[in-house]
């Protein structure tokens, strides 16, 4: 049962750090949805970073946090030119696999490690195991492209049926009931899901499974199990396909919706008004999470059924996954240095205009303490 928390996320500063010039990241693909907001803020933030270690720091995983990683990497590299950070947004499943194979210093994942993955981590974390460090949060936006419809409300049950190919036309009675004033066409629905193993998929299906259990019978997973639909690679692939196809619908981290100028669905959660996918509304849901990890593991449990006013429950929290002990000596210092920055006030506030929500104070304080103790 979820425990109510009285703490709320701290106000997010309006100033944000831009990605300008050439990023040191390789394999960035075509996901860049960022805009320039000036290099002065980057310089100021970089001046506060304590640089430790040097050489190449490899990491991979969540594409939902790719835009956050772009900002963090640009700023960190401005301060710590001796470290070459390469984050590949290959998807949470691929990132965890590479980490468990000992190929990367840390992994990014939109879902905490499962018990079998945590057990497997003991093979790469000498005399220890991995820990999940919640680093950034935000809403999973349901994006759509439907000519003539700029305002759309859906609930969990209707979404489940759409993504399981049980509702196939936009003028279906269930959609009409939720949108009585909209002129819904008979256009066929093209539902796009992730073709790669994805923490975003895991969290999206957790929402469907918890909020509409009678309509979504599948167990939440990184791999898509719903019937029908079309697969797309990465969050950028979802956004691109939705943008290019009238009648399309998909799910992705919010920055991919705003960065591609896509409409987003408002959720009917049972509250008095439908809830929009915004960082503030996601914050109200994330602040209701509780830590369920043991020891220094900080995996969270989210409340997908909340009916609190203004709370957007379709959220994800991205974790950085790293060994608690037994990290490789050649990358330990740089890993700690970089993660200290991402968990710092400056690192959290840097994402204000990228549609991410910072982790609540009580939790991010524990993250910082765990990073300090990594060995």
Image (cartoon, rainbow, N blue to C red):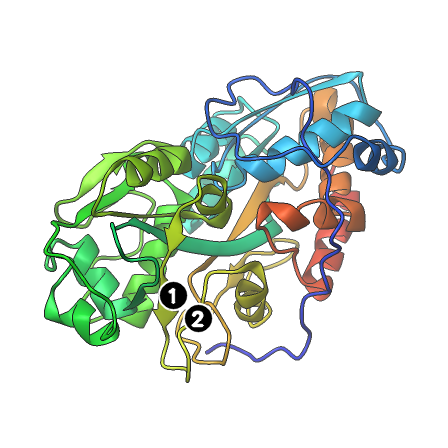
**Does the rendering let one see residue 129?**
no
Task: Note whether 114 is above or below 238 in the view shown.
Answer: below
From the viewer's perspective, is 35 left or right of 96? right
Mark before the other along the chain sequence, 1 or 2:
1
From the viewer's perspective, is 184 left or right of 118? left
Q: Residue at x 36, y 81 (%)?
A: 270
Q: Which residue is mark 1?
A: 266
Q: Residue furthest bottom?
A: 272
Total numbered circles: 2
Q: Nearer the viewer, residue 57 or 143?
A: 143
Q: Which residue is mark 2?
A: 275
Q: Where does residue 251 sit, x and y in percent of width and height?
A: 35, 49
Question: Which element is circle 1 on?
Answer: strand
**Does the rendering let one see residue 187?**
yes
Label 1 crowd (10 A; few <14 / some 14-19 / many >=20): many
Quadrant in the picture for the C terminus: top right
Q: Where does residue 206 sit, x and y in percent of width and height?
A: 35, 60
From the viewer's perspective, is 2 left or right of 181? right
Whether label 1 touches label 2, CB < 8 Å: yes
């Amino acid at each position: 049962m979820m425990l109510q928390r009285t703490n709320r996320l701290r106000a997010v500063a309006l100033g944000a750090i831009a990605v300008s010039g050439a990023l040191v990241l390789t394999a960035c693909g075509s996901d860049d949805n960022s805009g320039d907001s000036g290099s002065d803020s980057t310089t100021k933030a970089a001046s506060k970073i304590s640089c430790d270690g040097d050489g190449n720091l490899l990491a991979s995983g969540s594409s939902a946090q790719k835009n956050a990683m772009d900002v963090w990497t640009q700023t960190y590299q401005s301060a710590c030119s001796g470290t070459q950070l390469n984050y590949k947004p290959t998807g949470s499943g691929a990132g965890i696999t590479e980490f468990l194979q000992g190929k990367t210093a840390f992994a990014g994942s939109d879902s905490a490690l499962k018990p079998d993955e945590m057990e497997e981590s003991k093979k790469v974390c000498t005399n220890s195991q991995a820990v999940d460090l919640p680093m950034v949060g935000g809403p999973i936006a349901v994006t759509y492209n439907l000519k003539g419809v700029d305002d759309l409300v859906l609930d969990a049950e209707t979404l489940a049926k759409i993504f399981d190919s049980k509702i196939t036309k936009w003028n279906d009675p269930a959609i009409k009931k939720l949108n009585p004033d909209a002129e819904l066409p008979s256009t066929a629905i093209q539902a796009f899901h992730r073709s790669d193993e994805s923490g975003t998929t895991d969290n999206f299906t957790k929402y469907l499974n918890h909020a509409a259990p009678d309509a979504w019978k599948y167990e939440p997973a990184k791999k898509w199990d719903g019937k029908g639909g079309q697969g797309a690679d990465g969050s950028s692939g979802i956004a691109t396909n939705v943008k290019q196809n009238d009648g399309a619908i998909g799910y992705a981290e919010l920055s991919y919706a705003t960065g591609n100028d896509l409409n987003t669905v408002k959720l009917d959660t049972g509250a008095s008004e439908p809830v929009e996918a915004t960082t503030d509304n996601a914050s109200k849901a994330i602040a209701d999470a509780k830590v369920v990890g043991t020891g220094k593991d900080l995996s969270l449990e989210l409340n997908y059924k909340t009916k609190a006013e203004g709370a957007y429950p379709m959220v994800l929290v991205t974790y950085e996954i790293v060994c608690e002990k037994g990290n490789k000596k050649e990358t330990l210092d740089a890993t700690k240095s970089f993660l200290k920055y991402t968990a710092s006030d400056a690192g959290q506030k840097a994402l204000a205009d990228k549609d991410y929500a910072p982790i609540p104070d009580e939790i991010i304080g524990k993250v910082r303490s765990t990073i300090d103790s990594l060995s």
